[in-house]
Amino acid sequence: MNLRTTGFLLRPVVLLIALVHLVLGVLGFFFLPEANQAGENTLWIFSATGMLDVIRTVLGALGVIAFLKPSAIPAYCWLAFVAFAGLTAFGVLSAGTDMSGDAVNLSWADNVLHALTSLAALVIGIAATRVSRRKQSKTTENV
């Protein structure tokens, strides 16, 4: 597979990841616990808390920016990998407890989504880094 095709295939996947989290983040602000009855702070099967909605919205917006500027895809993917791996680790540890003061309040559906996103970001980050390194080596060979 040549460099142009590989880079071309990465962009739609980054956009999909970004839009999923951006939509969940923005819609989650309408389902905050302050506006609903106790236990109804969910968006479909995912948790909707203020902290989680901010994290998802910011990472989703950064993903859309990375889609628009393809040279930022490797940096975004590594950031998303670290962020969602951390959320997954925190979520796995906290999903088993019912602490009412938990600011993030992750459910198992959130943990699965974050783990899959982290894995996808890792794979895309590795592929995007390889593509950018190959492009750099080809430009230095031509000089």
Image (cartoon, rainbow, N blue to C red):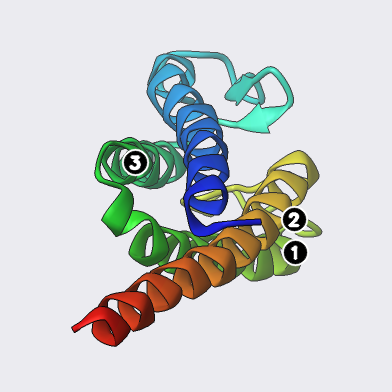
* Residue 49 relative to residue 9: left or right: left
User: Between disc 2 and disc 3, whose residue precedes?
Assistant: 3
x then y, percent, for residue 95: 75, 55
**Left-right relation of 7 to 71:** right
Secondary element at tag 3: helix
Label 3 crowd bin: few (<14), some (14–19), many (20+), radius 10 Å: some
Q: Which of the two discs, 2 and 3, sits closer to the camera?
A: 3
In the image, which disc is placed on residue 54?
A: 3
| Residue identified by numbered label 2 | 95
Residue contact at pointers 2 and 1, CB within 8 angstroms: yes
Q: How crowded is mark 2: few (under 14 residues within 10 Å), some or many (20 or more)?
A: some
Residue at numbered disc 1: 92
Q: Kindly give the residue lying farthest to the front in the view shown.
A: 142
How much space separates mark 2 and mark 1, taking CA atoms? 5 Å
Which residue is at 75% across, 59% downward? 97
The location of residue 102, given as percent across then percent down, is 53, 54
**Residue nearest the observer in this picture, 128 or 141:** 141
- Distance (Cα) linking label 1 and label 3: 20 Å
Decide which of 142, 98 is in the foreground and name it: 142
User: Given contact means CB atoms under 8 Å apart, are the residues at marks 2 and 3 in contact?
Assistant: no
Residue 123 placement: quadrant:
bottom right
Disc 3 marks which amino acid? Val
Could you tell me the amino acid type at mark 1? Answer: Val
Considering only order in the chain, which callout, 3 or 1, is on the residue closer to the N terminus? 3
Disc 2 from disc 3: Cα separation: 19 Å
